[in-house]
Each structure stands twice: as C-alpha cells, then as structure tokens.
Image (cartoon, grey):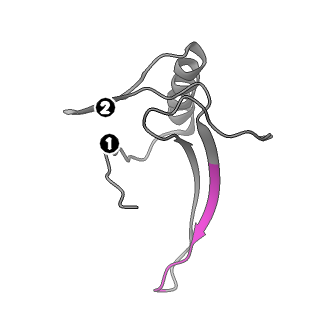
Amino acid sequence: MPEEVLFKFERSMERGEIADYLRSVADTLERGDDLTLEAGDESITLSPPARPTFEIKAERETSRSGGPAELSVEFELEWDEGDENGGDGELRIE
C-alpha cells in the first residue's frame, strides 16, 4: 500500500524536551481529544479511535560505508480511517 506523509518533523533535542512532547501526546490521548501536530506552516489534526494499534520498534541501521550504526526507537499509533476499534495485547516498558 502506498504511503503518503501527511506531516513530518525532525530535529535534535534534549531528552527532557522530547519527554515533554511525549507527555503532551499522552495527556491528549488520555483525555480522548484530537491530536494536532504543528511545526512552522504545517499542521494536521488527527482523531485516534478509542483503541488504536500501538507499535514500538527498536532498530539498528548499519552504514554501508562502515561508519557507526544508527539506533532508533519508534512509537507508532495506527488505525484505519473511520475505525473505532483496535488490537489487543499487553506491553511493559521499563
């Protein structure tokens, strides 16, 4: 399925700043509000359903030139447009 990027933001930040953004997202989800993302002149508002699918992925991307590997942790919420349900399961983060 083709992917269309609706919003993208990327910048180096202090860990505390990132935590503040993640807390803001968590608070918005907990309240059941729409999630609005804004950066510069870009903006999008999304309405996650009550039970979206939550995906966490940790990756190591190695460089072809032999340079250092890049590590990443991705947090993703997924749902079908118009979906009011989502997946089941348990997760523990420490």
Which residue is found at the position 61% from the left and 41% from the top?
53
| The image quarter in which residue 72 lies | bottom right
Q: Position of residue 20 (x, y in %)?
A: 53, 26
The residue under label 2 is 44
Q: Position of residue 11 (x, y in %)?
A: 38, 46
Characterize the magenta stretch by its predominant secondary structure: strand
Q: Amino acid at mark 2?
A: Ile
Whether the residues at callouts 2 and 1 have beta carbons within 8 Å, the answer is yes
Which residue is found at the position 46% from the left and 86% from the top?
65
Which residue is found at the position 54% from the left and 16% from the top?
32
The residue under label 1 is 7
Q: Position of residue 14 (x, y in %)?
A: 51, 39
Q: Which residues are magenta?
A: 56-65
Q: Nearer the viewer, residue 12 or 3?
A: 3
Which residue is found at the position 36% from the left and 57% from the top?
3
Q: Nearer the viewer, residue 26 or 52?
A: 52
Where, quadrant-wise, is the C terminus in this rendering? top right
> Residue 60 magenta-drawn?
yes
Q: Eyeballing the image, is 46 above or below 87?
A: above
Q: Eyeballing the image, is 30 above or below 20?
A: above
